[in-house]
């Protein structure tokens, strides 16, 4: 059965929001040696090789482009979920049960990307995609 127009439009809006906003995080890391060193240091702190810091480009550039374009959208969303779980585990694990200064969840931004990507996995790309799933 064909989905109504607004279902597909909602999926497009979700893809553009989650993927588009995450893409800014990835772009900010291009040529930013300090950010990569910071990630590398966290990886080394848990016994992982520092070169894995470059995988952030998969989760913050390649995956968002896949999501925004709607090409292998669910796979891109899974990559984004993995990226966010690693980020939470490495840098934000102490804040999982914390509230911020304004009363919101300390990890609301990370939660937005994590659960937004999970919704994309469940919903798929919708009709308005280069390669709808």
Image: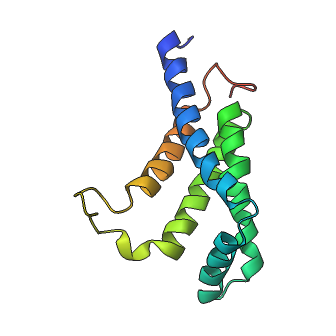
Residue 4 seen in render: no
Tell me residue 128's x, y (percent). Answer: 65, 20
Would residue 53 be found to the left or right of residue 98 on screen?
Answer: right
Residue 28 seen in render: yes
- Rendered-image quadrant of the N terminus: top right
Would residue 118 be found to the left or right of residue 32 on screen?
Answer: left
Vertically, is 15 above or below 81?
above
| View extreme (left): residue | 103
Q: Nearer the viewer, residue 113 or 24?
A: 24
Tell me how the rendering is colored.
rainbow
Vertically, is 55 above or below 91?
above
Residue drawn 68% across the image and 83% down it: 48
Count of numbered marks = 0
- Rendered-image quadrant of the C terminus: top right
Residue drawn 73% across the image and 38% down it: 72
Residue drawn 54% across the image and 41% down it: 18
Tell me residue 9's x, y (percent). Answer: 53, 19
Specify the quadrant of the image occupied by residue 42. Answer: bottom right
Q: Nearer the viewer, residue 75 or 27?
A: 27
Tell me residue 54's x, y (percent). Answer: 75, 67
Tell me residue 73's x, y (percent). Answer: 67, 37
Residue drawn 57% across the image and 11% down it: 2
Vertically, is 56 above or below 119?
below
Specify the quadrant of the image occupied by residue 53. Answer: bottom right
Q: Nearer the viewer, residue 46 or 54?
A: 54
């Amino acid at each position: 059965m064909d989905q109504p127009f607004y279902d597909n439009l909602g999926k497009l809006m979700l893809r553009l929001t989650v993927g588009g906003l995450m893409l800014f995080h990835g772009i900010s890391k291009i040529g930013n040696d300090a950010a990569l060193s910071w990630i590398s240091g966290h990886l080394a702190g848990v016994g992982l090789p520092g070169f894995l810091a470059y995988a952030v480009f998969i989760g913050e550039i390649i995956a968002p482009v896949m999501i925004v374009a709607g090409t292998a959208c669910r796979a891109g969303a899974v990559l984004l979920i993995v990226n966010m779980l690693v980020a939470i585990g490495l840098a934000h694990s102490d804040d999982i049960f914390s509230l911020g200064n304004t009363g919101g969840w300390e990890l609301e931004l990370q939660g937005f990307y994590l659960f937004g990507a999970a919704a994309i996995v469940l919903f798929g790309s919708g009709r308005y995609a280069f390669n709808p799933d």
